Image: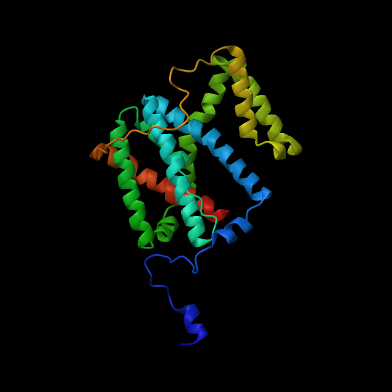
Amino acid sequence: MTAVDDVTRPDTDLFERPPRPWLRPAAVLRDFGPRYVSNGLIGLIFSCTGPVAVILAAGATGGLSQAELASWIFGVFALNGILTIAMSLAYRQPLGFFWTIPGTILVGGSLTHLSWAEVVGAFFATAALITVLGVTGLVRRTMEALPMPIVMAMVAGVFLSFGTNLVKALGSDFAIAVPMIVVFLLLSTVGALGRWMPPILGALLAGAVAVAFSGRFEPQPGSGNVFAAPVFTAPVFTWSALLELVVPLAITVIVVQNGQGVAV
């Protein structure tokens, strides 16, 4: 078989095999440095601010308990962190595993009339669907078949309430909303400041300071635990939850999140 045959021969393997030999610990440590640590820290801080706020807002909308919210956050950080480390080491690529923010907002609306167990069941069904699409190679064809403008319009509709709530906050929490907006706009428009601190992080810190000075921050008893104590939620599969959530959640993962990654 010639070299040309090796290049043109289609890959018939169902799963992409990691390169060999495996990375040694010395090679991993050699690639570490202050620049990479700082970039990772910025990414962690960003994921702990805006995206977590979306989860908290969705959970508050659905009336989830503190234990259920803590379990949700534990799952998206701990499990995705383990997958990110394992896959990045195995494939020697920056493969970051995250959760879909538009999907989280979508779930928040569904929690007003669906139980948390039903939503968990929809998560399982969505994961099974995405796995089938991935291993059969249908993801690319699915992305090509879905009109991107319509998908982006769906995403914009999901985020619309967050934009309108910003305006409402000026009337309900003026003393907290104004400092956050001012800091966000300042960090967004002044390039030197924005490089020093991400706008979303600066707005979060400004809001935290405003809340602290307002005297409205009252930690609940027992909220000082350092380690998470996740609770198990048995999935419940109902047609109403599956029909409402599975396809939209799959679209947010395959098209929106995957499309952003391909664009980057």
Which residue is most to the bottom?
1
Residue 237: name its quadrant: top left
Residue shown at the point (54%, 13%) measured from the top left:
216
Residue shown at the point (46%, 65%) measured from the top left:
18
Coordinates of residue 115 in the picture (x, y in percent): 29, 30
On screen, 173 above or below 258?
Answer: above
Apparent side of residue 25 relative to residue 193 in the rendered image (left or right): left
Which residue is most to the top?
215
On screen, 238 above or below 132?
Answer: above
Apparent side of residue 34 relative to residue 222 in the rendered image (left or right): right
Apparent side of residue 109 relative to residue 199 in the rendered image (left or right): left
- The image's colouring method is rainbow
Coordinates of residue 12 in the picture (x, y in percent): 38, 72
Coordinates of residue 156 in the picture (x, y in percent): 50, 38
Kindly tell me whether residue 258 is visible in this rendering. no
**Front in this rendered view, residue 17 or 34:** 34
Apparent side of residue 207 relative to residue 161 in the rendered image (left or right): right
Q: How many marks?
A: 0
On screen, 238 above or below 22?
Answer: above
On screen, 219 above or below 261?
Answer: above
Kindly tell me whether residue 149 is visible in this rendering. yes
Coordinates of residue 67 in the picture (x, y in percent): 37, 28
**Front in this rendered view, residue 58 or 189:** 58
Residue shown at the point (65%, 21%) measured from the top left:
179
